[in-house]
Image (cartoon, rainbow, N blue to C red):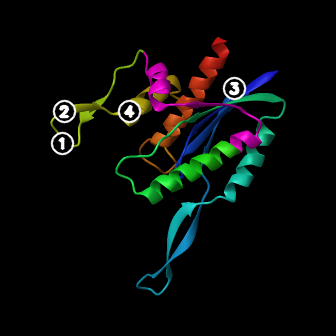
C-alpha cells in the first residue's frame, strides 16, 4: 500500500505538512477575524485574527481527498506547558494541539507523538547548531528556530518556507512541520 506522511507543529499558528505522491503540501492552521469589542478612530469595530475551529473540518476533507488509498503515518510534536505562560495560554495551546491530534485520528493515521529534542537530534544530525545569546546575554544557547530553517532549506531548496508568498522570512512553524514530516518518513522508510 502507498504511504503518506504528515508532520504537525501544534498550536494556533502551527502548520501541517503532508507528503504524498512525491509532493509536499503545507497547511497553515485555519484562522478568521473576530471583533474585539473595541472600536477604531474611524468608528469601525477593531478586529483580531483567531484560530478557527470550524476550519479544521474543511482541512480534514481536503487532506482526506489527497490521501485516498494511502496508509497515513503522522508525527505530532509532543508539547508540555510552557514556563512563563499564563494558565489560560497553556490551556488554549493544549486545546488546539488536542484538536490537531483529533484531525489525525479522524484521518485514521498511525500517530507518533515525539518530543522536540528527539526529532531535532535526528534531523539536525550532520548540521552545525546555530547559537544565539541567552536572555541574559552571558551565555550562548542553541537557536532551534534558525537551525530548523537551515536544515529544512538544505533538504528542500526549492520549497519556500515563508508563511505566505508576501512574507520575507521563514516561518518556524512551517519548517518544523516539514522536519517532523521528514522525521516520520525517515523512520518508517527505515523499517
Label 4 to label 1, Cα distance in Å?
Answer: 18 Å
Label 3 to label 2, Cα distance in Å?
Answer: 42 Å
- Which residue position is annotated with label 4? 144
Query: Circle 3 sits in a helix, a strand or a loop, which is it?
Result: loop
Q: Is residue 121 above or below residue 40?
A: above
Label 1 to label 2, Cα distance in Å?
Answer: 7 Å
- Which residue position is annotated with label 2? 139
Query: Circle 1 sits in a helix, a strand or a loop, which is it?
Result: loop
Query: Circle 4 sits in a helix, a strand or a loop, which is it?
Result: helix
Mark 4 or 1, which is nearer the eye?
1
The answer to whether residue 32 is left or right of residue 162 is: right
Of mark 3 and mark 2, the one earlier in the sequence is: 3
The answer to whether residue 124 is left or right of residue 158 is: left
**Res. 22 mark:** 3
Q: Residues within 10 Å of mark 3 (few under 14, many from 20)?
A: few
Of mark 1 and mark 3, the one earlier in the sequence is: 3
At a point 78% along the width and 35% down the height, the residue shown is: 67
User: Is residue 191 in sight in this rendering?
Assistant: yes
At a point 54% along the width and 62% down the height, the residue shown is: 50
Residue pushed farthest left?
138
Q: Badges 1 and 3: C-beta atoms under 8 Å apart?
A: no
Q: Position of residue 125 (x, y in %)?
A: 43, 17
Of mark 4 and mark 2, the one earlier in the sequence is: 2
Mark 1 or 3, which is nearer the eye?
1
Label 1 to label 3, Cα distance in Å?
Answer: 45 Å
Q: Position of residue 103 (x, y in %)?
A: 70, 45
Q: What is the span of residues highlighted in magenta in the rendered image?
A: 103-125
Residue pushed farthest front?
87
Q: Badges 1 and 2: C-beta atoms under 8 Å apart?
A: yes
Quarter holding the N terminus?
top right
- Which residue position is annotated with label 1? 136
At a point 63% along the width and 12% down the height, the residue shown is: 190
Amino acid at each position: 500500500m502507498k504511504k503518506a506522511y504528515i508532520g504537525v507543529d501544534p498550536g494556533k499558528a502551527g502548520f501541517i505538512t503532508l507528503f504524498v505522491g512525491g509532493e509536499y503540501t503545507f497547511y497553515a492552521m485555519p484562522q478568521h477575524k473576530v471583533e474585539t469589542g473595541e472600536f477604531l478612530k474611524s468608528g469601525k469595530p477593531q478586529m483580531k485574527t483567531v484560530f478557527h475551529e470550524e476550519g479544521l473540518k474543511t482541512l480534514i476533507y481536503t487532506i482526506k481527498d489527497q490521501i485516498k488509498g494511502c496508509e497515513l503515518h503522522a508525527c505530532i510534536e509532543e508539547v508540555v506547558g510552557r514556563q512563563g505562560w499564563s494558565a489560560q495560554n497553556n490551556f488554549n495551546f493544549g486545546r488546539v494541539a488536542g484538536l490537531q491530534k483529533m484531525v489525525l485520528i479522524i484521518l485514521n493515521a498511525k500517530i507518533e507523538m515525539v518530543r522536540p529534542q528527539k526529532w531535532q537530534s535526528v534531523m539536525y544530525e550532520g548540521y552545525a547548531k546555530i547559537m544565539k545569546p541567552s536572555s541574559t546575554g552571558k551565555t550562548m544557547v542553541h537557536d532551534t528556530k534558525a537551525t530548523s530553517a537551515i536544515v529544512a532549506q538544505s533538504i528542500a531548496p526549492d520549497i519556500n518556507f515563508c508563511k505566505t508568498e508576501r512574507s520575507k522570512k521563514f516561518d518556524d512553524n512551517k519548517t518544523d512541520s516539514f522536519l517532523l514530516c521528514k522525521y516520520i518518513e525517515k523512520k518508517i522508510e527505515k523499517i
